[in-house]
Image (cartoon, rainbow, N blue to C red):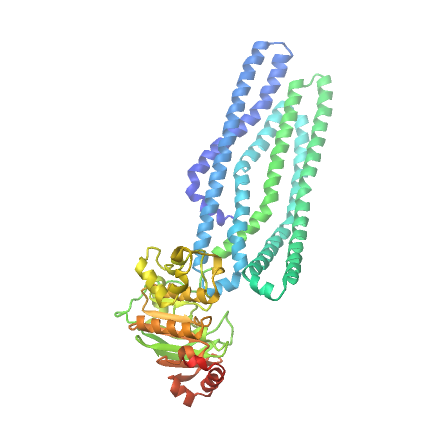
Amino acid sequence: MLKLYRGLRPYTRQLMVMVLLLFVQAFSMLMLPSMMSLIIDNGVVKGDMDYITMAGIIMVCITLAGSASAIGVGYFASKVAVGFCTDTRKRLFRHIDRFTLAEFDKVGTSSLTTRSTNDILQVQTFTIMLFRLIILAPIMCIGGIVLAFQKNASLAMVLVICMPVIIVFLVFVLRSAFPLFRSMQTKLDKVNLIIRENITGVRVVRAFTAEEREEQRFEAANEDMTQTSTKSQVKVSTLMPLLMLIINLGTVAVVWFGGQQISMGVIQVGDMMALIQYLMLIMYALVMMSLIFALMPRASVCAQRIVEVMEIQPDIVNPREPKTPQEQTGVVEFRGVALAYGGSATPAISNISFTALPGQTTALIGATGSGKSSVICTIPRLRDVTQGSVTVDGVDVREYDLAALRKRIGYVPQQSNLFAGTIRSNIAFADESMNEEQVLRAARIAQADEFISQKKLQYDDPIAEGGTNVSGGQRQRLTIARAMATDASIFVFDDSFSALDFKTDAAVRKAIKENTKNATVIIVAQRIGTIMDADKILVMDKGKIVGEGTHKELLATCDIYAQIAQTQLAEGGGENA
């Protein structure tokens, strides 16, 4: 938690003002019992109205000063805590935004969502409480004990006896509750995961009438979290009754022994009333501190989870001295490339070597799981190779500035991801200030202008989160348009035509070829019809290239390609179109 709180440095001035106000608030609260004691002993008992009036005015002034300082403390505590957590959320988001696919796989999307929202909110709640009481409560405790001993040392011993008992209960309860809070946050991750899966996969759930099973799955996870939460809250909730019991017993003891000392003339009534007030202030401070300690386990767990993410260093980072190729033509070359996932001993791809040239289309085809997507994800450095090298214009991609490298690549992923906004904002995703002509051109290339023109608001028509309000083919065409709207010299299409009918597929490929005559085009496809006109076709099987050539050459030299062609062209002769 201390590592996280280093982010409070920009708020030093506000914290100093808040500390000053806390001292004023504590002073006012400690002075009031003494003033009340003086009024009773020197004013009420003696019947001196002038003294009562003057002392009363002083008490009102002290009260107003204390109230004003309390308001100020609340304001600055909220401002600093909310500002600090806002900054932390920004830092966390920026840090997560630098993660590679490997880091996302390591932590999990649902857990990252929880840590960025709920965990930071828990830290914010605790921080506000901490700022308001971390200085006030100790001052009230220490000041109350000192002033109580000044009034009457024997009665003040009641306070000394009560405090260790309270501390023992605090330590016992918090030690048993801490593991439960950590477990609860993990189980909250699981609940978020199930909710996220059901929201994003609602069509699949309904298509297979799996609503009841998913409800049971959610209820099991929710019940598990509820039971853990209940256990932790039961443990924490025992603090308040125990504290109140100790406070009330202490008050009874002060009244009992104080009454005896008043009857013997040892102390006055006002002193005993002041002692009771000091007891209440001390106990109030301890209760407030107990609330801090009650919130601390969960906040500490949340802070640790946030710091864990912040301390994860992405595997893919900018080189210290980035290199820039002398000539930017778009030549992509693979030299003995191998890639393994998660430190696996068995590589997903191995011994991959080929060159993709500008003005040509290079295609990859093969069975599902043959490693096609693994090959192309190394070009924009979504993952780094474990052996060999991938170069763009003669420079290893690991020596490029990441932003400069990715700006040169128009990438269409296998999953057609759209963002909440409009059709225009999704096409112009790479540059919000993109001119109208560039957006319209990209839509025409992707054959998306036809269905966009039928929309009520056309390019300003809204797109729902994930693009759920457009069909799969429309979503795929918009992602192609998004890539074509860039000024890239390398275009990578990862199975980006699978949702298109043969006619649209052919039209999109024709438009892409006409508009990328000087660019390098790399296509991953499952359909022969999509890549049979490519200048170079690479056939992949079990993570290796087993064939290379044109469509006609591979039909004669590569059995795997011939089998794929025979199966697809026999079943769907229209693919030759």
x and y percent of residue 213 in the render?
A: 65, 62
Q: Nearer the viewer, residue 362 or 498?
A: 498
Measured along the vertical axis of the image, is residue 498 above or below residue 31?
A: below
Please identify the quadrant where the C terminus is shown: bottom left
Q: Residue at x 44, y 62 (%)?
A: 314
Q: Residue furthest left?
A: 326
Q: Is residue 178 something one can see in this rendering?
A: yes
Q: Residue at x 61, y 56 (%)?
A: 187
x and y percent of residue 416 in the render?
A: 45, 65
Q: Is residue 168 something one can see in this rendering?
A: no
Q: Is residue 402 left or right of residue 419?
A: left
x and y percent of residue 532 in the render?
A: 39, 81
Measured along the vertical axis of the image, is residue 128 above or below residue 155?
A: below
Q: Quadrant of residue 94?
A: bottom left
Q: Is residue 225 left or right of residue 260?
A: left
Q: Residue furthest bottom?
A: 556
x and y percent of residue 283 in the render?
A: 64, 33
Q: Nearer the viewer, residue 48 or 397?
A: 397
Q: Nearer the viewer, residue 89 or 547?
A: 547
Q: Is residue 341 left or right of residue 272?
A: left
